[in-house]
Image: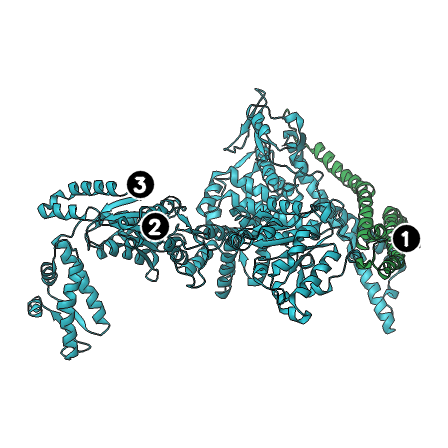
Amino acid sequence: MKTVLGYHDKQKEYYGLLDKTLPLLIQERYEPFLITTRELLMVRTTVLDRLSIEFPIRHIVRKAKNSIGLALMIPGILTSLIYITDFATAIAQSQSVSAFLPAWLTNLTFWLAVWGAMILWHETYKSITTSARIAPSVQFSEHDVKTMKKGDLGLSKRTTRSIPDVLQHDAYELLFSAVKDKHIDMHTLFWNVINSPRGQLILDRLNIDPQSSSLKKTADRKHLPVYEITAARSLLVYAAQEAVLAESPTVDPEHLLIALFKVFPALMTFLQKKRLNIELLRYVAAWIQIKETGVEETRIFNPRVPYIPTGGIARSWIYGYTFVLSHYSRDLTQELSRKGGHYGIGHETELEEVLSILSKASKHNVLLVGESGTGKTSIAKGIAERLNRGTVPPAIKGMRVIQLDINGLIAAGPAYGNLETLVQQTMQELERAGNTILFIDEIQEIVAVQGQESKHSLAGILLPYIMESSFPIVGTITYADYKKFIQSRGSLQQSFEMVEIHEVTTDAAFNIILTMIESLERQYQLKITFPAILSAVELAQRYVHDRKLPDSAVNIIEAACASAHKDKVVVLTERRVAQSVSQRIDIPVEEVTVEEATRLMNLETDIKSRVIGQDEAVHQIVEALKRSRTGIRDPRKPIGSFLFLGPTGVGKTYLAKTVGDVYFGEKHELIRLDMSEFKDISSISRFLGSAEDNASSGPTTTFLDLVQRNPYSVVLLDEMEKSHPHILDLFLQVLDEGHMTNAKGETVSFDNTIIIATSNIGSKTLLDTLERDNALFEESKEQVLSELRDTIRVEFLNRFDKIVVFSPHSSENLAAIAELLLKELKDRLKEKEVTLDWDESLPQAIARNAFQPGLGARPLRRYIQDNIESLIAQKLLEHSIKPGDSFLFQTDFLRSASV
Amino acid sequence: MFSSGQTTALTQPRRVFISSQAVIDEIVSFFHWWYIEMPSRYVGLFHRILVISDDTLSISLLIRTIFVPWHRDPSWVGRGFGIAMRLLYLPFAMLLTLTCMLILAVCVILWAVLPGISLIFLLKTPFT
């Protein structure tokens, strides 16, 4: 928390805090204020009143001053042009133009122009500076927060600052243009700010059209009325809060705009309808401020901007040559000083840790360990960036970062006799240079490479230099490779200080993409809205598990830009980003459209038309899919987890397959595990893999590999009661937290899977009961569940979203299933241009003839194969049925077929 | 710290007063800016240019490391060349810095006298 809003009740001499609600305090007795760690910001009513009275007059005086300045300058400019022409004609030796002008006139216009320039310069200076600046604020300490909550706001300890003194010139003009006769017209103020350049910039980045009828309707005089001028105090205090949060030294028009959105409920509702919020507005305001700060930092002649000495043109004179090394390396510090950019965002703590290790006198080698895409290389570039800016400990000031090109070094080895000689030469150069930090990306590669003569690995050749620590080394490596290549080599491990690099937060990923906005917009010739960036980060976190943030989010935004550019789209919106992600992963991730909403609402009917007689199971699964698709479910768990019980052939597996087809599409795989193959605990390696790939047999595909490759699928665990109990235990974490860790330490996410386990526990009970009486099904269900709890551990069963008992098929169900199977056959024959029809009684006849107790619907398929398909096949071969014919299969044919 | 909240009404005399106050404020503000604010910025600028010049031309750095061998070559050639290069280079660098300072000083002097000179010339012009 960097700011605290409060108010002073002058009548009761009471100080209160404004927490969630932000009212416009119109009554004079209530005076709002803002506290930061260093200042108390407020507005006196007398000041506001005076400024509002003086503003129109001073505005006219300033305009007159500008006009006078211009009026004085223009003749002078003309005179200068004449003299320039004079010079040109003198060269051409033709008649001088200035000969026609009297000398006193040219002198007069010249000196008047000088005064005009001085006046305009003064006016420009005043318009870009303020008499005061807001002091930067930091987070309040816990002690401060506790003290404030007890009532001691510490007002006297802080510098009092009048907010009008820190109002930026444009914001000042916009505010007081809306003030008249001691009243402030919020409608005028809002539209003034919206139509200002800063306001336009914010709306542009949020993809809001200022001319839209919805905005005009929302921001009308009814919702933005006229208030007494005392209301402006609250508005200014809230705007000052936004300025502090954006780390701006002045209150700018965009802060006024955010304050207006915060105060008026109608404007807030407008934002919510556009799926926007105040946080996004703040991001844009902060981005504007970062850009301005970035521009200001380039003004090195401005005494206010800190200047960091870098050593100058002769810096390299005091360091050694690196002739050979320069051929097999890149100077990152030099590259980044040309290219610019911000690196290491989201890893500030790790970067500070790395810099402090590098500045140690000894043992100053660093190994950055983390998953791919978490930003390890960005940290190395961040070191180079900080060296360029000089914001590093004194011990490493003036140094440079050189990235070693391992492949180039290896390829050049023979040219120098052998690799060992080349490496020794480069290392000696590095020792002599004295100003170099060596960066080796993917340092595990030096372990694998061997020298020709010594047969030592490159790491072995480098080891003496690494251990001596004559120059700092920074390496990057993943966890898996660290375990494989470094941990087993004690001397190598001890030569480095390990710094773990974790995935950045979504905020940091957002900020990283912000730094790339301008280059992406230039490259793809489009404009990127902030909701699009937010969408990319959120979708990356939710749906992309094979890469980490920020890499996954950057990848999504770049892919979306490329796709938009291809389709000649000029504005990248969040919808476009979602579409791009949907196309990539083949799963709908965009907001639910009207058509899809209708489809989702009819989903249950659709599935029931394909899966006969298991209405309860279908209902439960469809509810889970609806929760998932509308974004309501817990994103850290699987979409749904179900346990299906029932005898064979009742549709458990078929329902799993149908759900996969309907939700993920027919291209997506059903990952099916026959759990009877995992009776032995040694089969656990088929789930998790092994830490080392077996060189002789090659890598094998495990269950987790399948899920990793198909993260959007139905995982079917068939006959789960037949597996070893410890194998089932692996799924406890999956069902609870949506992930499993393989033998290599990689986490595989199950967030976008539907897990369906099936079991035949209780099947006999169900069949026996139903043979006696169908009406006893509910009672038999209870028995089945009881048997289940006796067989499988309760903590495992408890983690399923739903346990569903499938009922054996009735004869009506079997007839309906027969009808479905006949329709499938009809579709297959359509491809052969043969139209199949059947009489009404055929499905019932099939159900009757094919029924075998306890075997469910499977006999129906076999019966149709043997009795209908075979007959049709025979007739096709005999040409009694030809393409284009219609064939009516009558029930009587069944008797002749079976004969 | 907090106000009593009294306000005043805008009458015609007050309007005239505020207008003349605004004109006077602009004139005073101009001369305050010209002779106080900007010169103090020039002092800061003077110092900044000195720092940048010293850093860019590596003057202090080379003086501090005058005996460091050329590119850390520890031989007599490296040592001799290092000193020779510094002794040849430093006078030129210092001369360049001094020239920049002189130009800036001239600009500051011009800045100070410009309003006066321009007024004098403006007043003299009808008589020339």
State which tag comes first along the sequence, 3 or 2: 2
Q: Residue furthest right?
A: B128
Q: What crowding class fits label 3: few (fewer than 14 Cα within 10 Å), some (14-19), or many (20 or more)?
A: few
Chain given the colour green: B
Q: CA distance from mark 1 to mark 3?
A: 103 Å
Asked whether A405 or A343 is in front, the reply is A405
Residue bearing the label numbered 3: A798
Asked whether A890 or A24 is in front, the reply is A890
Task: Answer whether residue A818 is visible to the viewer in this image.
Answer: no
A532 sits to left or right of A679 = right
Asked whether A470 or A288 is in front, the reply is A470
Between tags 1 and 3, which lies in front? Answer: 3
Do the residues indicated by labels 1 and 2 lie within the same chain of the protein?
no
Which amino acid, mark 3? Asn
Between tags 3 and 2, which lies in front? Answer: 2
Which amino acid, mark 2? Ile
Residue bearing the label numbered 2: A681
Residue bearing the label numbered 1: B126
Query: Which image quadrant: the N terminus of chain A?
Result: top right
Q: Position of residue A322 (x, y in %)?
A: 73, 62
- In the rendered image, which quarter is residue A521 located in? bottom right
Q: Secondary structure at mark 2?
A: helix
